[in-house]
Image (cartoon, helix red, strand yellow):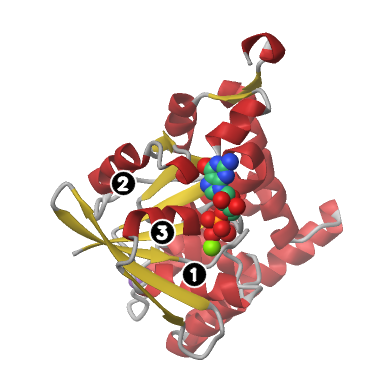
Amino acid sequence: MTTVALAGNPNSGKTTLFNGLTGARQHVGNYPGVTVEHKRGTYNHDGISVEVEDLPGIYSLSAYSAEEEVARDFLIRQTPDVVIDIVDSSNLERNLYLSVQLKEMGLPVCLALNMMDVAESRGMEIDTEKLSFLMRTPVVPIVARKSEGIHEMMNRALEIAGKDPGPFKISYGPDIDPILDEMARAIDQDPVLDEAIRPRWSALKYLEGDETIKNSIAKRAPELEAKLNDMAKALDSHLRSTLDTYAEALIADHRYGYIKSILQQGVLTYRKDREAKS
Ligand code: GDP
Ligand code: MG
Ligand code: K
């Protein structure tokens, strides 16, 4: 059975979409060991049975909260065939921060631009084709509350389910990029590590100071972890002395910069005659 995970920021409309898809065919429980709610249901799409997982609402994949940890763990361990990323279109810039990270994980991601009714009432015009081209991923406008666009969204999601989404790399600048490449290569070439998620993502998380990734590599490949640790430390001390910053902060800056540049390439514009049209 094809598995679809619904990911997104809190209040982006995941549960509305989940309930619309699965109706009464759902099962609610808790994730083992944590009090984060776990919801799974089934949906029949033109005769294809799809298992849908409603992940906890998150802003990032950094594992700083129980919700992030649960969502990330699910994505890493269960590797759903496709992730539908529910985006609140009326807060496009902030919501894309998670979308970029989902893409960086190397999973097939379909962007569902929800709350299009709200975005439109605010005069926002979103060029979905341009966004799709720049993010290298399908983008479908929906209004979950009115069940608009859902069938098309599922069509696009199932088209990419289980397929290699191809590379998605954003630049973190001249200080970080070469180190990131070197760390990713070391992880990739390590005979013991068999990272389900792309090595570059693990390297990125390592540089962001992610304890879960660090411990997981340390447990299986302690020599490699010592080497990665030296590289990360050297980078941080270089960044501190030259730019008065550190890797995690610089990585976040570049991600936000990348999103801003996408929006400024004509993805987001504001209607000037919005009074006249409404
Ligand atoms: P979740 O936190 O991601 O699970 O979000 P919910 O599904 O609980 O939705 C948050 C709020 O947004 C609820 O009041 C929904 O009724 C509302 N909502 C969901 N989808 C839409 C939509 O497309 N348009 C509008 N206007 N409201 C929506
Ligand atoms: Mg919810
Ligand atoms: K490997």
Of mark 1 and mark 2, the one earlier in the sequence is 1
Rendering coords of residue 189 (x, y %): 36, 68
Disc 1 vs disc 2: Cβ atoms closer than 8 Å?
Answer: no
Answer with the quadrant where ligand 3 appears in the image. Answer: bottom left
Residue 19 is marked as 3
Q: Name the residue type under label 2.
A: Ala
Residue toward you, 225 or 150: 150
What residue lies at 49% left-to-right and 45% top-to-bottom? 145
Q: Nearer the viewer, residue 231 or 141?
A: 141
Q: In the structure shown, which secondary structural element does the residue marked by tag 3 occupy?
A: helix
Tell me which corner region of the image, top left, top right, bottom left or bottom right, holds residue 58.
Answer: bottom right
Numbered badge on residue 87: none
Q: Amino acid at mark 3?
A: Asn
- Residue 116 visible (yes or no): yes
Whether residue 143 is situated above or below residue 188 in the rendered picture: above
Foreground: disc 1 or disc 2: 2
The C terminus appears in which quarter of the rendering? Answer: top right
From the top left corner, tell me how far across and down residue 188 is, in percent: 38, 66
Find disc 2 in the rendering and name its residue. 157
In percent of width and height, residue 229 lies at: 62, 76
Residue 266, picture quadrant: top right
Which residue is label 1 attached to?
Answer: 72
Q: Earlier in the sequence, mark 3 or mark 1?
A: 3
**Amino acid type of disc 1?**
Arg
SS for dot 2:
helix
In the displayed structure image, the side of residue 37 where residue 80 appears, left or right: left
Vertical arrangement, residue 259 with respect to residue 68, above or below: above
Q: Please report contact status of discs 3 and 2: CB closer than 8 Å, yes or no.
A: no
Label 1 crowd (10 A; few <14 / some 14-19 / many >=20): many
Label 3 beta carbon less than 8 Å to ligand 1: yes
Q: Measuring 31% from the left and 46% from the top, which residue is drawn there?
A: 157
